[in-house]
Every structure is written in C-alpha cells, then in structure tokens.
Amino acid sequence: MDITVKDLTHLYNPKTPFERIALKDINVQIKSGTFLSIIGHTGSGKSTFIQHINGLLKPAKGEITVGDVTIKAGEKNPKLTALRKKVGLVFQYPEHQLFEETVEKDICFGPMNFGAAEEEAKRKARDALDLVGLPESVLNRSPFDLSGGQMRRVAIAGVLAVEPEVIILDEPTAGLDPVGRREMLSLFMKLHKQKSLTTIMVTHSMDDAAFYSDEVMVMDKGRVVMKDKPEAVFSHIEKLQSLGLDVPETIKFLLQLDERCQVGIGTPVFSIPETAAKIMEMLGQGREKGARV
Amino acid sequence: MDKLIEVNELFFRYNEEDQWILKGVSLFVKQGEWLSIIGHNGSGKSTLAKCLNGLLLPEKGSVRVNHLDTRDESHIWDIRRQVGMVFQNPDNQFVGSTVRDDVAFGMENHGIPREEMLIRLDDALKQVQMEAFADREPHRLSGGQKQRVAIAGIIALKPSIIILDEATSMLDPEGRSEIIRTMRLLNKEHGVTVISITHDLEEAIYSDRIIVMNHGELLDQGSPRDIFKETKLLKDIGLDLPFTVKLRQELQKQGCPLSDRALFQEELVEELWTLRSKI
C-alpha cells in the first residue's frame, strides 16, 4: 500500500504559549512493499510521524495519503476505521497493552472490533498465533502467565489478526536479549515477505536499520534529513554523527582499520561475512599497492 | 581483596507454589569493581539484582552487604542506602516536581540534615553533569538526562554500590553513552562499585568481571576475555557474542591467520595491520 506524505507539519499544544513544532514540512513517499527504518535522536519526531500514518494524530498542515484514504489538515477526517484496519501499529513494549483473560480473547479483540464474527475472529487468532511462532496450546492461557517474549508475540499477533497491509513497529526489540531480538526481527522480515507488507520500523539500532531495510529515513528536529538506501545513508558518517547518531558496528570497524591501512572502505556493508570479505580485500589491496611501489 | 557483597546458596521464588527463580546462587562482589551480569531474558538476572539490596529476600541462603544480612530488618535501611539501584524505565522513577526536589527526596527519607543536604545536592548534580538543570521538570528531560538525575538521587546518599538494572536499554545511543560515561567516572574517580545487568555485550567487554546467569543458576564467571573464549557455551544458552569476536571468527573462517585473542575492535585492527605489513 503506497503512502504519500505532503508538506506535513504538526504542532504540539497549538494556540497555547507552549506551542512547539513537532514535525515540519515533511514530504515522503513510501512505496508499497518497502521495508523502511526510521532513525533519529529521541525527540526528533519519529513517533509523532508514525502516528500520523494511521490517523492517531492529525496534521496542522499538509496531507497524508495511505492507499485510497487521505487525511488533510483543516478538513474533517474521512472514516478512519478502514485506515486503521489496514495500518497496524505495534507500540513500544506492546505487551503492556494485553488485558484479556485468555490469549485467544486478547487476539480476537482486534478483529471483532473491526466487525468480524466470533468464529471468524477465532480462526484469525489461530492463524496469527501461528505466524508469530506460538503453539495453539497457549490460546486458553492467561497472557500474564507467559514469559515477556511470549507476551510480546501475543500482542503482535493481536495486530496481525486484523490482517493489516502496512505494519508500523515502534522499537520492536527494546528490552529483548540478543537472541530474542534476532528472532523478533526475523519474524518481521518473514511476515514482510510472506504477506507482502509495507513495514515501517522505528529503531535506535543502526545495525538493525542497516541490515534489514530497503530504505532508511533519518529525522532530526521534526524534519526528514535523509531518506535513501542503507548504503547511501550510512556513507554520510559525519552528518550522522553531527545529529547525535551512530553508524553500524561494521562501518565503525572498517573506518578504524582504514585509518591504519589507508585504502578506503568503498561501499558500506552491514553483515559480518560481508565485512570479513571486505577486510580480506582491503588487506590484499594494500599488498598490491606495496608491490607496485 | 574486600568483599562488599557476599551471596551464599541463594534460593528465591515469588510464590511457594512457583518454581525457583534463583537456585542456589553463590557469588561475591569486590570493592571498587565493575561487574556485569549477563544472561537471556528470564535467566534470573533482575531478580538477583533485587536480592542484592534487600528489595527481595532469600527464601533459603543469605545475602550480606558489608557483612549485614538483608533479612535483618534493623539493617534494611542502611543496606538500601548503600546499594542504590537505577531501573530500566526512566519515566517510572520520578517523584519530585523539579530535578532538585527529586534528588532531595531520597535524602529526606533518610533524614539527612538540611545544610548537609544542600551540599550533597549540588555535589551529586555536578557529578552527573546536570547542575544546569536543577530547576527543570524531570519529565521534560531526555531519557539519558532522566537516568542521570536518577543516578544523582542515588549518589547523594553516598552509596558504596550502584546497580544498573538494564538502565540503558530504553535509551538512544547518545543517552546510552552518557550513562556509561557518568558511571565510569563514578567508578574510577569515586571508587563506586558498579553492578550492571545488561544485554549490551559491547558494554560488558569493558567490565572487570562478568557473571553469566542461566535458568536461575550461576553458569560462569571470569574476566571478559575468559568469558568470551567459551563461545560455544554462550551460544548454547542463547547468548550472543561481542562484535569483535564474531568478526574475528568469520575472518578465521575465511582463511585469515588470526590469533584467538582480540576482544576489542582496536585489538583486531592492530592484529590485522600487523598481518598486512608482514604480507
């Protein structure tokens, strides 16, 4: 589902002495099927931005179009139910929002809220549970008896059961251990491909942004500073650092090595095997140069 | 070697019907060290941390802080003053309406006289470099600043130990390095003992010692270099390896004749550089 954002501006506490610009003149196009990561300092506007995409926040200026729904500043909102069904938002620590007596009831809440009959909702709940890799045996358990990682999966299943076409993740791996993080991210990668989703992920991890996304969008002080392929974004190292952001570990290492070897790091790479291959190449290159001298 | 905390055969569970969360953990914490405790979610790390300052009490075994037993009610306030704790969520630990009030809160609770309080307040805010924010409202600060205020509230009580319970996990990279910088300073310059419960292995490699927890038991302990030599053991219990170790292993796999030594990025860079000049 294509998402188009035109001249979007958002104000906090409008028309009060505390008025503050949260987002300023944002123009962005997110093509259907893209995996986009959003990075930026705390307070750069990432969360405010994503909340516009499913109509939780309304623009002060500009417009947002998601599929065939357009939300325009100053105009009455169109029917948001359709939009919210298509755009699933997974908040930070989604497990804090579980509330039902059983896992099944909790996952069914979404689909039934959007008008599904009980039987249909139950079927969707089972499918969603399968997608997040939990066994059916947890359906009748209380979500609060599960482990933290399982609770998060249940909360995500609740969003998936509504069968959204766009999924927005606000720091989906916060608080997880390294293995839990990797599992969670492969889960989203799998869903992204299987269900042809458009995925938007807000993250503080430069490594994850670099490794998983088709595109990375950098925000600062409510504006979009860059939006490009990870290789392009993470080539602007000084710019990122001036925004208080980091670069992926792989790049940090290559830069350190290059300081000693002076052969240049070329196109950024983000996986460990690719980095190792590049290092072998850098070492070899040095040798050739030496031979020529 | 001065043992500041001694944990002996500690068993803990939340309810009598439940399974043990901690199963016979024995360990010690040395004066002035930076100790990291790693382990996957649910391994008992945070429960262990809460036992160390008497927020939770052992069902069997004992925890002693400076020779005081946490089960002895007459010492509990002294123990909690000595062992401060910074929690994960920066938004859940504020009570005061200004930074100054918030830092003073703990001191008021401990009945510290006003004149002394004023001195400690300024001193604590200076140590975390938040003196310019004394009159600000805590909820308007960034995550890293909030955590530094929480740390100031603790150091105002002159603790011997500060426990970071995943205190950086909700922060952005900048906030994270602010906290680590502040804590290193307190550790090195002021001799505060630090216990850091963390998933961040790039932080853990800088500790003096690491304890690995698994299913409520202490699985391994040692220097970072020793711990990350046991790569198979760590992988088996679902833990990751530091970046440098992973890259080093991949380079070895691709035929680069490296030693098994490098733990820090700089060390691997040096070794690669030496290799290159030899070629």
Image (cartoon, coloured by chain):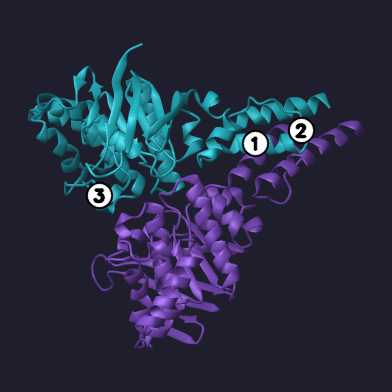
Chain colours: A purple, B cyan
Mark 3 or 2, closer to the camera: 2
Q: Which residue is mark 3?
A: B92
On residue A256, the disc is 1
Q: Secondary structure at mark 1?
A: helix
Q: Residue at x 33, y 28 (%)?
A: B24
Q: Amino acid at mark 1?
A: Gln
Task: Estimate the spatial distance between the alpha carbons at disc 1 and disc 2, rounded to whole Å.
Answer: 18 Å
Q: Which of the pair A132/A61 is nearer the observer?
A: A132
Q: Is residue A168 above or below residue A58?
A: above
Picture quadrant where residue B46 is located: top left
Q: Nearer the viewer, mark 3 or mark 1?
A: 3
Q: In the picture provided, is B205 more to the left or to the right than B272? A: left
The image position of residue A118, as x and y in percent, is 35, 81
User: Which chain is disc 3 placed on?
Assistant: B
Marks 3 and 2, how far apart at CA: 49 Å
Viewer-side residue, A47 vs A32? A32
The amino acid at mark 2 is Cys
- Write down the quadrant of residue A143 in the picture: bottom left
Q: Check disc 2 and report the residue beneath it.
A: B256
